[in-house]
Image (cartoon, rainbow, N blue to C red):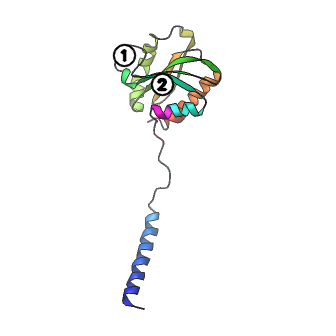
Amino acid sequence: MSRHRSLGLSLGLALVMLLSAACDYVVTTPPAPTPADFGGIAIEFAKRGLHLDGIVSGDPGCDDSTLAPTAIAFDANGLDQETPVRIYLYVFRNRAAYERLRTTIDTCAQSYVTDPDSFESAEQSPFVMAGQGPWAPEFEAVLRGGLEVAAGTGD
């Protein structure tokens, strides 16, 4: 066997061994899901049969300048909710912001809820949805489920 061929085989074998060893260090589990942006949330709702319209970014439903950057208002209907309802979605940066600002949403809601007995809300860190209800049962279940999937790990 020629010296060059022997060297080539040795280098090839060394490369195979190196690649095999590297496989032991490759992470094969998927990363933990992070919270979705509004587009991801809207897709989760659409996949479940909801329709969104009248989307307005920065509308918290009240005059709270702290909540405005986190808020997206939209009309939603679908499934057993024939009449569109206005929903305010608050998308916080992380769980710490969610925990710090969660109670301010209840105060804000007082300006857009006309009947406190039928006020509706759903939350899954780092998201909160709120609006005037009542929400139909299947519609509400889908809102909650979509929000939970979109929240990922909630961090």
Chain-order first, disc 2 or disc 1: 1
Q: Nearer the viewer, residue 75 or 96?
A: 75
Residue for point 37% across, 86% down: 4
Secondary structure of residue under mark 1: loop
Image position of 50 with respect to 63: above or below:
below
Q: Position of residue 100 (x, y in %)?
A: 39, 25
Residue for point 37% across, 21% down: 68
Residue for point 47% across, 30% down: 125
Q: Nearer the viewer, residue 140 or 48?
A: 48
At label 2, the amino acid type is Val
Magenta-span inclusion, residue 92:
no
Secondary structure of residue under mark 2: strand
Tag of residue 128: 2
Q: Position of residue 79 (x, y in %)?
A: 64, 25
Image position of 67 with respect to 39: above or below:
above
> What is the quadrant of the N terminus in the image?
bottom left
Place residue 3 in its image quadrant. bottom left
At label 1, the amino acid type is Asp
Image position of 3 with respect to 52: above or below:
below
Compared across the picture, whether 134 is left or right of 13 comes to right
Residue range (magenta): 33-41
Crowding near the residue tagged with mark 2, few <14, some 14–19, many ≥20 C-alpha atoms within 10 Å:
some
Magenta-span inclusion, residue 39:
yes
Place residue 18 in its image quadrant. bottom left
The CA distance from mark 2 to mark 1 is 15 Å
Tag of residue 127: none
Residue for point 39% across, 91% down: 2
Q: Position of residue 52 (x, y in %)?
A: 53, 25
Q: Nearer the viewer, residue 14 or 56?
A: 56
- The residue labelled by disc 1 is 64
Q: Which residue is most to the left?
A: 65
